[in-house]
């Protein structure tokens, strides 16, 4: 960014949350398909009450 001074921002990180269906769409547009989705790094099941997710994508196969 032009005029960016890290010292003036400290440790601030700008981020935007993307919900799983939005990530799936972005992946499809990039030529990927969902392979697996878990509720955590321990591969617990993903459900509507999951607070996070781990999504694994692979290239779309014909």
Image (cartoon, rainbow, N blue to C red):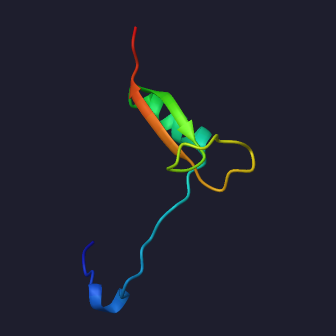
Q: Nearer the viewer, residue 9 or 2?
A: 9
Q: Which residue is drawn at 40% across and 19% down?
A: 60
Residue at image position (42%, 80%) is: 12
Residue 25 in the figure: left or right of residue 5? right
Write the residue at 33% across / 91% down: 8
Query: Would you identify the image quadrant in which residue 61 lies?
Result: top left
Tell me the residue at 51%/32% (across/down). 36
Q: Quadrant of the C terminus?
A: top left
Q: Residue 4 in the image: state x and y as whole percent.
A: 27, 80
From the viewer's perspective, is residue 12 above or below residue 60?
Answer: below
All told, the count of numbered labels is 0
Q: Position of residue 30 (x, y in %)?
A: 39, 31
**Quarter assignment of residue 17:** bottom right
Q: Where is residue 49 in the image (x, y as percent from the top left)?
A: 75, 50
* Residue 12, placed above or below residue 16: below
In this view, which residue lies farthest toward the bottom? 8
User: Quadrant where the N terminus lies?
Assistant: bottom left
Work out whether 4 lies above or below 33.
below
Q: Residue furthest top?
A: 62
Q: Nearer the viewer, residue 36 or 18?
A: 36
In screen coordinates, is 16 left or right of 45? left
């Amino acid at each position: 960014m032009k005029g960016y001074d890290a010292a003036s921002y400290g440790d601030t990180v700008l981020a935007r949350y993307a919900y799983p269906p939005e990530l799936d769409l972005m992946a499809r547009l990039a030529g990927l398909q969902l392979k697996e989705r878990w509720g955590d790094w321990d591969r617990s099941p993903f459900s509507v009450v999951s607070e996070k997710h781990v999504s694994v994508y692979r290239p779309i196969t014909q």
